[in-house]
Image (cartoon, rainbow, N blue to C red):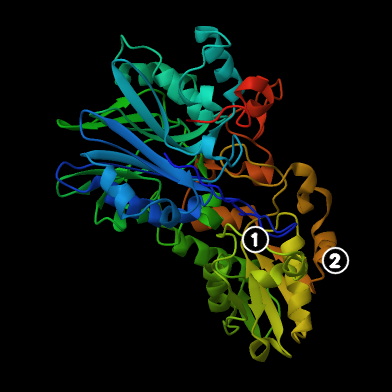
Amino acid sequence: MPRGDGLLSHDLLPGEKGPQDACGVFGVWAPGEEVAKLTYYGLYALQHRGQESAGIASSDGQRLLVYKDMGLVSQVFNERSLASLRGHLAIGHCRYSTTGGSTWENAQPTLGGHDDGTVALAHNGNLINSAELRDLVEEVHGESGHRGEIRYGNTTDTALVTALLADNPDRTLEAQALEVLPKLRGAFCFVFMDETTLYAARDPHGIRPLVIGRLERGWVVASESAGLDIVGASFVREVEPGELVIIDEDGLRSRRFAEPEPKGCVFEYVYLARPDTSISGRVVHEARVEMGRALAREHPVEADLVMPTPESGTPAAIGYAQESGIPFGHGLVKNSYVGRTFIAPSQTIRQLGIRLKLNPLREVIKGKRLVVVDDSIVRGNTQRALVRMLREAGAAEVHVRISSPPVRWPCFYGIDFATRAELIANGLEIDAVCRSIGADSLGYISQEGMVAATGQSESRLCTACFTGKYPVALPEDGRLGKSVLELQLPVDLTAEAVRRP
């Protein structure tokens, strides 16, 4: 497994960091196919869910190999590395960190095992009882008896689950999974494997999406249906909340490890998922267009042009234009490669702020009353800079419309929002937020309008980032957060002290 020497600069500009995507997972069981290449393209389709690191594990039935590194899927893999990943089954992962820092040691899939077998695991989501699980690992093995990648400085909840899955050589991996999975709390979609079998599991609330597809000669599991489309797999169904799926030479079978209590993340519809993905029977693009229509009904304004903040605001802006009758147009050009480089910007470039990402089309904007549609406001820095830039380009008025309600609470289930103290809507009323960003008016979609656009019942959705009502109770001891495991690590087990040979 190679180690990248570059500094990954995902969050390039001060104050520009918005809601960061959850991770993407992909798994394939397909004898006779080039499973590593199928996984590579599956991860390519899921790249929007994580851009910090990528990895693939494969097995030929006898030997399991893992190849991973920092960077985008296209930066980590080439023909040579993919050719080394032979076999009939594989899993893959693209990461945005929610537990444990963005380091090579924390890239996935994670690896563990014993003399009788190996386990590789990829995870989308975030566990809220990671500290408790670490205590459990130490209880079984002692403080110095860390298993798998934990001993090399991996500080993720994924490594803890891998260690627990590989804990008992006297049990099959399936039996051990049925023992371990009920102990996990929070959001998780796992794809994992040993030398012969592919597994997939989804938490009892189904907070993050996970789907099953069929190939002519095998099966595919992916975070989103777009990951099935790219490899030519036909959609079969979603992995059910609380379900463990097992795929081997005998086909696909299912085990139940918990009763389902569906609470799918509503922010998947708002922002996280690809617009061409379908979740619970609803195409995400259609949901976002409908959110824009609802915005136009709830917050009408006289204007000359409806324009999106690329790319996340585009479907909702289309819906707003359709409902309002105001022409739709693009007033901003986006540099798609910002945030996907290993080279940090100079101080001069930093001072240009949002212009590194977006640049106005002055001929389109000048003299116009604009409706600017975006998916969310987190800290408010991006919108403030955007409004200023549009006014400098000659906009007569700038009316901001947001296709989600005010974000007032952090997410502990796989989205890396700002802390609650940094969330602009937590401390200010809507009129004050409007003044803070410098807009002529500001309108957020209502929670009822957003939920209706998803086609789902509110009782089946997690809306915690808007309401503070968390479907999985948070630990009372407060042992939460991205660095919870790093803070507990003994000094000699930190990533700075221990490196892989």
Q: Nearer the viewer, residue 65 or 423?
A: 65
Residue type at tag 2 = Arg
- Residue at disc 1, secondary structure: loop
The image position of residue 106, as x and y in percent, is: 53, 36
Q: Quadrant of residue 178?
A: top left
> Mark 2 against mark 1, which lies toward the viewer?
2
- Work out how far the residue at label 2 is from the one at label 1, CA to CA, in angstroms: 18 Å
Q: Is residue 353 visible?
A: yes
Kindly indicate the quadrant of the structure image that contains residue 17. Answer: bottom right
Can you say whether 448 is above or below 475 in the image?
A: below
Instruction: Identify the residue under disc 2.
Output: 435
- Where the N terminus falls, by quadrant? top left
Q: Which of these two is toward me, 22 or 375?
A: 22
Numbered circle sitting on residue 410:
none
Q: Residue at x 21, y 28 (%)?
A: 62
Which class describes the residues within 10 Å of circle 1: few (<14), some (14-19), or many (20+)? Answer: many
Is label 2 in a helix, a strand or a loop? helix
The answer to whether 61 is drawn above or below residue 138 in the figure is: below
The residue that mark 1 highlights is: 445
